[in-house]
Amino acid sequence: MGAMQQWLREQSTVRARRGTVRNTTARNTTVRNAAAGDSAARDTLLDLASNDYLGLSIDPRLQAAAIDAIGRFGTGARASRVVTGTQPVHAELEAELCRLTGQPAALAFSSGYAANLGILTALGGPGTLIVRDEHCHASLIDGARLSRSPVEVFTHGDLAALDRLLASRSQPRAVVVVESIYSVLGDAADLRETARICAKHDTLLVVDEAHGIGVAGGGRGAVHAAGLAGAEHVVLTATLSKALGAQGGAALGPAALRAHLVNTARSFIFDTGLAPAAAAAAAEACRIIAADPSLAQAVLGNAAIIAHVCGIEQAAGAVQSVPVGRAEDAAQLAVRLEEAGVLVGCFRPPSVPDGISRLRLTARADLAPEQVWHAAGLVAGMVAALEAGTPVPVGGIDAAMHLGRVGAR
């Protein structure tokens, strides 16, 4: 056996021992609004793990828009956007994103990851200090690393530390990077105060709205809700694959920023354009969200049920985070819950630090409240059993059995 093959085998053993093995197993998730125990959902999983917060990925309006785009423009963009890959549907998407968020200009990327890499590498360099919150997503961490900029990291949510870092910088330019709603804990950034500090120090603020668009501010995002839409020193990135139910990413801000990205963002210039079907579906999602704020309200209503049943403080958006502790325990609970018919996220190192692994439950607008009560009750019962040192049960658990003792955790 060669050295590389031996190393790969050793790494596999380490992952198994630490409880950090991941897989790409295909799963059949529940149909829309199928009540717990309904025969229509008998062989499916109730999905509290995906990021399809509004249920738009299976909405007939998005499907029709995608099919129409395939008929008009083909199944792929066929080239980079700066060659022949830009189609009218891309301009349509960017215009709808601007209308939804209140931003003056937008540029669509092939993914949210590519958008974050693109904006930070295009704005970075030796003369730009990048300062990011320690809980920023991996795409923002990688973008900062690839930017060739000096990088400083501040303790999560510590705006006094951010103020000090900006006050002591030696670089002529600075970029602060935060998320509007964080993907692991589900907590929200104080965008107004962060923007105030950035303005004070002549600093650009980049806000990743991956978990904000479609949920916060009636669906228009946390930047819009904070009254910062169109502010010259505040720009945002977004993914089209969560609440928008499609695929792709975007950077939004002043027209000068868009022009700079078109000419310098390598993850845009050297990537094939976003597939027309995804662009059309995301554009339709923007129109639906703008016209129907009740979708965002439904997400938060189901999030409140999850938080109440699981005995945790309700987080700002769709993501509700249930702490477990050891990675092995979190992985075991996720498996048992799947056996009981509920699919949840399992966050373990390196996604979170050692010792604070957690189950991540995402509320969705297209789930009936009874489904959410049932699923949250399963989670609460299993977590309570783990904490009590009793065997973790398998199978159905009545949520009402656990409300009294689990709700006070």
Image (cartoon, rainbow, N blue to C red):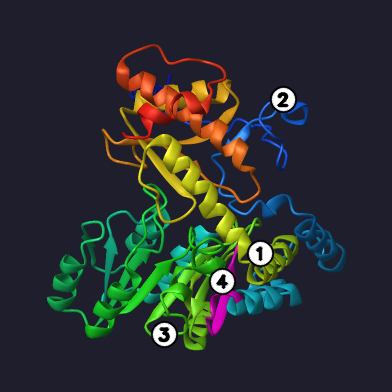
Measuring 54% from the left and 70% from the top, which residue is drawn there? 220
Residue 273 at x, y percent in the picture: 65, 66
Instruction: Report the residue marked by disc 2.
Output: 43
Query: In the displayed structure, does residue 242 sit left or right of residue 86?
Result: left
136 lies above or below 161: above
From mark 2 to mark 4, how far is it between C-alphas? 44 Å
Helix, strand or loop for disc 4:
helix
Measuring 29% from the left and 36% from the top, which residue is drawn there? 356
Assign the C terminus to one quadrant of the image: top left
Instruction: Report the residue marked by disc 1.
Output: 274
Along the line of sight, the residue nearer the viewer: 200 or 317:
317
Q: Which residue type does callout 3 highlight?
A: Ala
Instruction: Report the residue marked by disc 3.
Output: 231
Q: Is there CB contact under 8 Å for labels 2 and 4?
A: no
Assign the N terminus to one quadrant of the image: top left
Circle on res. 269: 4
Q: How many marks?
A: 4
